[in-house]
Image: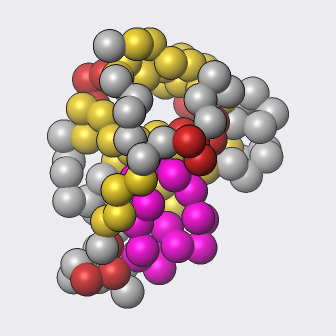
Amino acid sequence: MTRYTGSCHCSAVEFEVDTDLTTGLLCDCSLCKRKNIIMHRVPKERFRLTKGKDALTLYQWNTRIAEHYFCKYCGIYTHHKLRTRPDSIAVNVGCIDTVNARELPITFAEGSKLSGGR
């Protein structure tokens, strides 16, 4: 397991995640397909927000169970708490400078087929 550090574009928000980052995830729900971001899921105890809690803006929609966090200064989505897996966090792999998200094998999630996934 490796510890990765990530940040938004302006570095107001920073996080750490302990994981074996071997795959990425693309979701096709109405929000994720517009974000077009490669994510990686981890158990929530392996994610730590290390800077910028006050710089985060929360976005929720439909069932208001998932919590999508963005930097209020630069607008970058950094992570979210999952609706279907409340014990997990999905991080934006693009926020981790040491990883090229496009080189990861991608798993596809059919969020659009879930209730409220639009």
Figure quadrant of residue 67:
bottom left
**Residue 17 % position (x, y):** 42, 22
Residue 99 on the magenta segment:
no
Q: Is residue 51 left or right of residue 84?
A: right
Image height of 111 relative to 39, above or below: below
Colour convention of the picture: secondary structure
Classify 94 as above or below 37.
above
Image coordinates for residue 14, horizontal then vertical, percent: 61, 24
In front here: 40 or 43?
A: 40
Residue at 35% x, 48% y is 81
Q: Position of residue 116 (x, y in %)?
A: 29, 82
- Magenta segment: 24-39
| Residue 111: quarter of image | bottom left
Mark yes or no: residue 80 visible. Answer: no
Closest to the observer: 86 or 114? 114
Q: Give the vertical position of 85 relative to 83 (above or below).
A: above
Q: Nearer the viewer, residue 33 or 24?
A: 24
